Amino acid sequence: MNTELIGIIATFGLTVAIAIPLGKYLAKVFAGEKVWTDFINPIEKLIYKLSGINPKEQMDWKQHLKVLLLINSIW
């Protein structure tokens, strides 16, 4: 009983502790500001180029459905 309660309290405490920093990080990402993970951008662009994906192009609902079904069939 005690270990379960400690686990629940620790999980809740960790969630509360990272909520504000994670929220600030996500706000910067969606605002297009510079963030510490920008060093991954060249790798991301290379993967997009090799895959033939245009990151500026939006997906419609049919493309989302196709990818969802493909991923679920693989997993």
Image: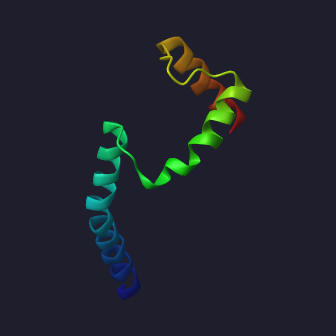
Q: Which colour scheme is used?
A: rainbow
Q: Is residue 64 left or right of residue 45?
A: left
Q: Position of residue 53 (x, y in %)?
A: 63, 22
Taking the view exactly as shown, the residue that stands out farthest to the bottom is 2
Q: Which residue is drawn at 47% across and 17% down?
A: 58
Tell me the quarter of the picture where residue 36 sits.
bottom left
Q: Which residue is drawn at 58% across and 20% down?
A: 54
Q: In this view, does 36 lie to the left or right of 21?
A: right
| Viewer-nearest residue: 22 or 33 | 33
Q: Which residue is drawn at 35% across and 82% down?
A: 6
Is 73 drawn above or below residue 57 in the view shown?
below
| Viewer-nearest residue: 3 or 28 | 28
Q: Position of residue 37 (x, y in %)?
A: 49, 52
Is 21 drawn above or below residue 39 in the view shown?
below
Q: Where is residue 15 in the image (x, y as percent from the top left)?
A: 32, 65
In which quadrant of the rendered image does the N terminus lie? Answer: bottom left
How many numbered discs?
0
Q: Is residue 8 left or right of residue 61?
A: left
| Viewer-nearest residue: 34 or 20 | 34
Q: Where is residue 67 in the image (x, y as percent from the top left)?
A: 60, 24
Q: Which residue is drawn at 68% across and 39% down?
A: 75
Is 70 drawn above or below residue 33 in the view shown?
above
